[in-house]
Image (tube, rainbow, N blue to C red):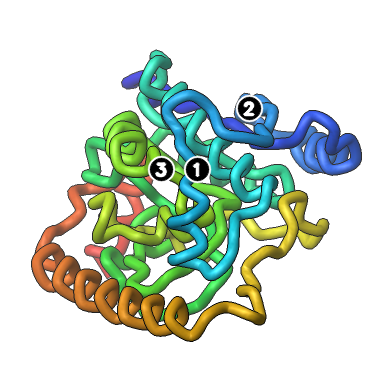
Amino acid sequence: MSQPQRTRIVVISMRDSIERRAAFLDRAKNAAVSWTFFDGLSGVVPGLVYDDSRARVLLGRSLGRGEIGCYASHYTLWTQLLRDDADQYVVLEDDVIVNWKFLEKLAQVDFGQSGIDYLRLYCLRPGRLSVRRYRYLENRHLIALRDPAYGTQGYVITRAGARRLVESCGRIVRPIDSQLDRYWEHGLPNLALFPFPIIDEFAGSTIGDHRVRAANEPARARIERKLRSAWDRVRRMAWLLTRSHRQVRDPCRFAAPLAEHAAGE
């Protein structure tokens, strides 16, 4: 039997979030797969630049300290993966409830071999999607999200995916989840598993809700943002039209019996 794919499961958590850490530890006490906490950051790190003037143009506001720290935490894990001997990371945040039995199997999948370098395990916003592979892993379907989905509660990232994100996401101009949704820029399809193998536990955000724009935002800025949003829609559609023909290669070995069973029905 071949060895399981080298996968590390990393949980982003602020060191001083004592109650959240304790709650996650309690939920994970029977997990059959190893994982570690990663201490969340609160500011920019080497390789990252926060462009406040650009953020104000794109968002109508500055990013909050928590948003910048969240961005830096995910970015740092991508750079860490590039130096690690692991092939892929499962990145989780500490406010999720995990299906650990499924995650144990997920950790054995060579997603890079399947042509998947970024795979969401959860999202916050419903939108247009297409089914890329029915019953891709056990009873979960592989879907491609076309619209912004938001949320960084959990995802799989391969070394190749991390390299692409590090190369394209070094300037902070929007929250990290919004940046990850921009597949037409970084080139990683916004793929996800459905039903989700994790769910969000309502525990209150540690970065705050900063998405509301300033009430006194100049009219010129609003007009420019609408024009940029329209241009993004054009670029997104062009990306989908040129990439939609690409197929995902065969998934992991633990899904093969199910595929054989479906073929015999």
Looking at the rendered structure, the secondary structure element under dot 3 is strand
For marks 3 and 2, the one nearer the N-term is 2
The percent position of residue 50, horizontal first and vertical second, equals 50, 42
Position of 207 relative to 8 (above/below): below
Residue at the spot of label 1: 50
Which amino acid type corresponds to the residue marked 3 in the rendered image? Arg
The percent position of residue 2, horizontal first and vertical second, equals 32, 21
Left or right: residue 205 versus residue 57 is right
Q: Residues within 10 Å of mark 3 (few under 14, many from 20)?
A: some
Is label 3 in contact with label 1 (beta carbons under 8 Å)?
yes
Task: Please name the residue shown 65% across and 27% down the image.
Answer: 38
Q: Residues within 10 Å of mark 1 (few under 14, many from 20)?
A: some
Task: Please name the residue shown 50% across and 30% down the image.
Answer: 77
Which amino acid type corresponds to the residue marked 2 in the rendered image? Trp
Position of 252 relative to 80 (above/below): below
Task: Please name the residue shown 40% across and 30% down the image.
Answer: 88
Q: Which mark is residue 35?
A: 2
Cα distance between the residues tagged 1 and 2: 30 Å
Cα distance between the residues tagged 3 and 1: 6 Å
Looking at the rendered structure, the secondary structure element under dot 2 is loop
Looking at the rendered structure, the secondary structure element under dot 1 is strand
Residue at the spot of label 3: 171
